[in-house]
Image: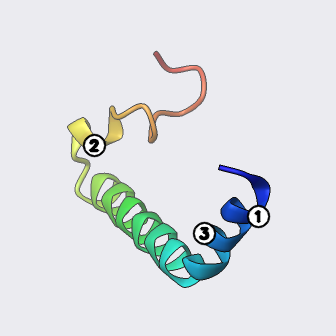
Amino acid sequence: MNETTDQNFFQKNKEKLGLGALVVYILLLGLGTIGEIWEVEWILDLPLFRPPGKY
């Protein structure tokens, strides 16, 4: 793929990519919130939600 094809792809799909990123963000935010409020350990132990330095 060349540079113009990449630009066309992102221009054509900008809304879908932005909406997809927003949905993923909201799902992760909700999952982290559920883990914190109800203290669900398997959620809190996921690498994404571990505090820095905890292995």
The label shown at residue 9 is: 3
* Mark 2 or 1, closer to the camera: 1
Q: Residue 41 vs residue 54: left or right?
A: left
Vertical placement of 10 versus 54: above or below? below
Residue marked by disc 1? 4
Q: Earlier in the sequence, mark 3 or mark 1?
A: 1
Q: Is residue 29 left or right of residue 44?
A: right
What amino acid is at disc 1?
Thr
In the orientation shown, which residue stands out farthest toward the top? 55
Amino acid under disc 3: Phe
Q: x, y (%) of residue 16? A: 48, 79
- Indicate the secondary structure of the residue bearing disc 1: helix
Which of pointers 2 and 3 indicates the residue nearer the eye?
Answer: 3
Rendered residue at 34%/40% (across/down): 44
Instruction: Give the structural element (helix, strand or loop) at label 2.
Output: helix
Within 10 Å of disc 3 (Cα), the crowding (few <14, some 14-19, many 20+) is few
Residue matched to label 2 = 43
In whole angstroms, how far apart are the C-alphas of marks 3 and 1? 9 Å
